[in-house]
Structure formats: C-alpha cells, structure tokens
Amino acid sequence: MRIGAFICKCGPNVSEKIDLDEVKRVIEKQPDMASVVIENFPCSPAGKTLLKQTIKDQNLTHCVFAACSHREHEKTFARLLDEAGRNPYMMEMANIREHVAWMVSDRQQATERAIFQIKAAIAKVRHNQPLDHKEIEVSTAVAIIGGGIAGIKAAKLAARDGRKVYLIDRDPSVGGKMPCWEKSYPTMDCNPCFLAPEIGDLKDIANIEVITNADIDEIVGFFGSFTVRLTQKPRYVNDGCMTCGECGKVCPVKVEDPFQFGLVERSAIHVPFPGCLPAMASIDHAACLRYKGGDCDKCAAACMFGAIDYNQADRKRELAVGALVLATGFEVPAVQKLARFGGGKIANVYSAAQVERMLSSTGPTHARLQLADGSTPRSVAILGCAGRDGHCSRVCCAISLKYARYVAEHYPEMAVTFVHHDLCLAGEGLQRFHDDIVKAGKTAFRKMADYRTTRVVTDGDQPAIVYPDAAGKEQRVAADMVVLAMGMQPAAGSAELCAMLSVDRNPEGFVAKNHAKMDPNTSGIAGIYIAGCAGGPKDVQESVMNAEGAAGQAASALRPGEKVRLEVAIAYADENACSGCRACLAVCPYKAITADAEKQVAVVSEVLCKGCGTCVAACPSGAMHNHHFEYAALRDSLTALLGRS
Amino acid sequence: MSFEPTIVAFICNWCSYGGADKAGAAKLECPANVRLLRVMCSGRVDPQLLVRALQQGADGVMVLGCHPGDCHYKKGNYSTLRRDQLLQRMLEQFGVEPGRISLDWVSAAEGEKFARVTNEMVERIRQLGPFRRDNPELTRLRATVP
C-alpha cells in the first residue's frame, strides 16, 4: 500500500490558519505514507497536472486530499484519479477548510484538529476498495395510474413514438368521471360523445395496454426503473360478452350504484356504462352472493353467450416502466348526506352529481329532471359552494349555470334560483355563458355572505336553502328541488398511493407540484408526473392540457438508449452470517432488500439500494456490509480521530 | 488548566455536513475539540460506534442528521431516532451520565445551529467533566463491543 497525501493551501484560506508544515511533518510519519505534498490550489489545471504526475511517479495506490468540502471537489479529485489510471474510489478527503480553517481561529488548535481529521481520512482510505460503476438502461415505458380523460390523453400522447404505455384503472372500465355527466359547459354539447372516440382509439393503439379492475400493490424503484406490482381482479366475465345486460336483469342483488351517485341501485353483475372499455359486464365481487358463501348462478343461466366464468382468479402483474403518471382524478363528496343539508332525510335534496345523472340520456330518469315521487319540479334552487372545504373546486359555478341554461331551454316554466358566494367564471367562454343566462331573465341570482353556515331545512313540503346575506340577515329560498354543488375532493386511495411513492400532497390534499409555477406537471419525485384532477380541481379542457403536458415531460425525459448511473457504494449481505431475521428489510427506505425464500437470507438489490447504510447499522449479526463505509473502516477512522492509533 | 473535552460528531453527508460547511463559510466560531466523522446517513451510525467512541477517548459523542421528514434517504433518520431512544436508556443503566451522547438535527442551511449545538455540547461536557473510563459498569460494556 502506498498512500499519498495532498494538502491544499487554498491560497491564504488554509495556509494562514493552519501550520501546514507541522501537519506535513506529522503525517509523513504515518505508516505506508509514500508521499506528502503541500500544493496551492490542486484543483487548478497546474495543480491537477502535478497531482497526476505525483500519483504516477510515486506509484500511489491510495490518496488523501486534505482540502475543502467534499461537496466542492470530491468529483474533481475522483476524476483526477481516473485520469491518472486509478480507481476513483481509492481516495478520501479531509475537510480542513470549511470544517477547520474557517471555523477555528486559534492556529494551534486548528493545526491539531487538522492533523486528527487527516489521520482519520488515512485510516479510512486503507479500507477503500476499487468499485466499478454500473449503469442500467432506462425503461421508456410509462405506467399511467388512472384511466379517466387525463389518463387516456396522456396515454395516447406517450404512446406515439413507439413507447409502451400501461393504462391502469381500479374500476372495471376506463373513462373516469366524464361518462357520468352528459352536458358540458359552455357549449352544452355531449361529453360521452367526445369521450367515445378517445376510448375507441385505445383498443387500436398497439402499444397501449389497458389494465382495468386493478389494485396497485406496490411500486418500487426510481426514475428510469420503476417496478409496478398490481393485482388485476377478476370480473368473472370473458370476452364473449355482448353487453346485452340480460344478466343484470336476473341478478337478485341490489346495491347502491356509485355511477349514479346513489340515485338508484344496481345489481352485482353490471355493464359499467354504454361504451365502456373493456366492453364487458363485470361482477362486483363484494356484492355478489357467490363470493359470500351462496351458490347463485342466475346470471350464467341467463347469458346466451356463455360469457360468465365464476372461476376467474386474481392475476398478478409486474410492470417495468421508466415513469409514472398519476391520473387518479377526484372524488365526489356525498354532500346531500351531510347533517347540515338534512342528512339525507329531507326529500328532494340532491347533489349536483346526482342531477347530472338525471340529465343524462342514459341516466335513471332518461334525461328528465324529476322529484322523488316522479313529478316534475316547478322550481329548483341551486346552492353553490356546498362542498367547499378549504379550496374552491373551480367548476361548480359553471356547472350551476349549466343547469340554469338547461332548465331555461327544456323547462321554460321552471323557476331557477342560484344562491352563490363568488361567481367563478375563469374558464373559456364562461363570462359570455353567464351574461346570456342573465339576459334571458329566467334565473334569479342570490349572493350569500358566508358559504360555511348555509344549510337546508324543510319549509312545509319543500326543502329550503338558508343562507346569510351581506347584511348578516338569514335568508331563505324554498323550491321543489334543492341542488347542492359539491366540489371535488382528492380521489379515495390517492393519499395512500402518494405515501407509497413518497410524493407530497399540497394542503388541499392533491398531488403537490415540483414547482407551483415553473414545473406544474411533475411531482417532487423524479419520474412521477401529474395529469388532470389528481393535481387539483379542473375541468376537462384543463385536464387535457395538463395530461398532455405530463406525457410530454415523461416522453422527453426518457429516451431510448439513455442510461442511469447506479450508486455503487451500496450495501450487500454476507450470506454466511445472515440469520434471516429480516430486520434490514423493515428499515430499508427504498424496499431494496428482499428475503431469499430458499436460503432464508437477505438479498440487496443493486439497482434500488442507495447506500444509506441504515440496514448495516440495524443488522444484529453484522452480516450486512456497506461498500466504502464498512464498519471496520469507520471503527479505524474513529480510533485515528481520537488519537489512539 | 480547565478541562477541554474531546468530542466526536458523526455528521451525515447531506444535511449536517452541509450545515458544518455553512458554519465554516460564515466564519462562525466552532469548537476545535469537536472532531467530525462523515457518514452518508445518520442511519448508518451503529450505536456500537458511539459507545466505542467513549471508550477510546471521547468525553462526548454527537450524532447530527437531517430533520425528520427531510432525510435524503427518506427515513434513515427515523432509525437513528429510535436507536438513540434505546441507547439513552441503556447508557443510564451502565452509569453513563445523560448528555454524553446526543442526537440533533441540523439542515444544510443551518450553519448557525451547527455552531450553536457544537458549542453547547462542549460546554455541557465541560460541566460533566471527563468521561470516567474506569467505571466498573463500563468495563462490562467494553467487553461486549467489538
């Protein structure tokens, strides 16, 4: 072993605060020291030339650089070693500038301290091993979590250019919330009509694989190399299905239909919606009698195409992708059930989502606005901000105006009152939309002073909205039907997904952006992008903008042939010493350690391990090791630091 | 001559090392008798090393890591915290005064905090006095640490 020490004067920075000659005198006496050189600015071109020459001339095998901070020049000296034909890991630095010369004013104390720090670095470098760099090629595949309009648009854009895309949804069909509402503002045209060709395209694009009815079990990895583990749950229906719906007619089970937001019930076996993809019925496992111990087979008996298969099982998939797009959408809170709005007990109080279903031609009332008893309301009162809880959901004022417009057109005799707090008209064409409605003169506008204290009460046989006006006085609007604008909340399960990925959420609970203004399509984690309402409330136009932005980011960041450098100062397990206790598995922040079932020992993934060393300290058997930071190295370094060697 | 303690501080590569850099860059006076040992993460710090430091001449030992929630390796510092809690209980049983081994969080921006905690540690150990290596409880402990 031939150790070389290079002590940097750093101009006056170090040389004036530390007696470098004394340092050299002491360090020269260390065992195996072949050379000690004091140099001014070894980081300069002349300095680097001298160092490289010295390394070669003196046949140095290990180098210590007593200089500035690692953060400043560790890479410089590593590259220098490489250029001198040495392995770049055969070096250590002793920070005698920031950590000694600049902190300690007493020259004597600074000199003594510098000597200890350098001795510690020498003791450590003795243990260093030549480590080789490893690279992996990035995967250019993209996994999109959430198959609503944002996920679909992101998938289509990413799939151009030959990228493999996995479009994953936990429901039996893609489509998200868009199929639920038919009328779209401000043009009053048909959402399902826009969505149908988008969904239709998916089956024709070869590199998009749609995976529905899937739960994400685990995602590990990092940008360029994620592994997505999911379980595709069985729908118990195969592709012989013609979506005729005969199965649903004979099914004895009735459960609240989430697609209809609780307006009506559906059976356990059901076709998600007209135009769903996959175009198949699906059995709701939680509702079906067969999976609760019963043996009903009415749907199989009724199916003319033999498409029911009760024996389908979970299918586990493991996907290797380079980027993730979070397109988890939003949830519609059931505000009609809130105590302040009657707790579901006052008749004819509906959430806006329920009204959307009423207005849909495929909805339970076939596009008729009707009360619980089937009659047509004579009056409707819409309460804005009913679900407003910490954030404005951006779309509800426009949606409320949409109803006003619809009613004016289809029910010209119906009285409409819109009780609003603000009037959020930020979207394209919305000011005009509003102005036309005002000009038509059929809608009354009432302004409330505080959206938090509004409530719904019964007034005779009608529901009534109670709200404070600007003077603080309580006002009341009674109508045959009350509609509550419920806003958007982050999707159920998105918090858990973000926690799994270590992705932050903003105070409103939506996915936080890397930079609110400058980088809004990316989360704080490299390789994880945000599309649609997962990042915050927006309408369809904005969701598509954002989704295509996210896909563009993902596609431009992952180019075929690009490589990612792996960390090599990583942990590894000594099989012979490992007792299989799995303490290391539990503490690893990257889930980089797995248990070899056969040998009952820990195995560290070279790809996932980042070299933090937490597992090494956790191992009770001393079986876990850390390249470049072995226990023996730290032990000997400590001994030298304390002046005991 | 008043007693000048010897302190070793284990500093993590990302936060506390940076905090020390910042203290130096700001020319804050930090005690010369706090000697620094770099690890990649405070989670790497094996409690055996902390005990060993006391046995080998340190009068006090510090572990400085990233603030909880800010660990460069996501949650290495949570392991550090849990180990420290157990270690403190154990040390008490071996007759080691509380305060000899300390854990603190210093971010890369906190040059001032680095200066403060190191100065405070030296003062605290100065008050406690030199670490008594001839404590019979410790002889038992010494035998078990490799």
Image: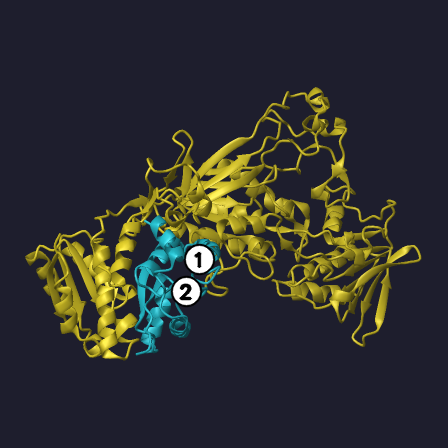
**On screen, A8 above or below A124?**
below
- Judging by colour alone, the chain drawn in cyan in this rendered image is B
Subunit that carries the residue with mark 2: B
* Location of residue A581 in the rendering, given as x and y in whole percent from the top left corner: 44, 39
Q: Residue A18: x, y in percent?
A: 20, 75
The amino acid beneath tag 1 is: Leu
The C terminus of chain A sits in image quarter: bottom left
Q: Which residue is mark 2?
A: B100
Labelled pair 2, 1 in contact (Cβ < 8 Å): yes
Q: Is residue A226 above or below residue B3?
A: above
Could you tell whether A633 is left or right of A367 in the image?
left
Instruction: Kindly tell me whether residue A449 is visible in this rendering.
Output: yes
**Image quadrant of residue A429?**
bottom right
Mark 2 and mark 1, same subunit? yes
Look at the image and give the colour of chain A.
Answer: yellow
Residue A182: x and y, percent? 68, 48
- Is disc 2 surrounded by few (<14), some (14 to 19) or many (20+) residues within 10 Å? many
Q: Chain of mark 1?
A: B
Helix, strand or loop under label 1: helix
The residue that mark 1 highlights is B91
Q: Earlier in the sequence, mark 2 or mark 1?
A: 1
- Secondary structure beneath dot 2 equals loop
| In-image side of B144 versus A395 (left or right) | left
Q: How many numbered marks does the figure carry? A: 2
Pick the residue in front: A415 or A266: A266
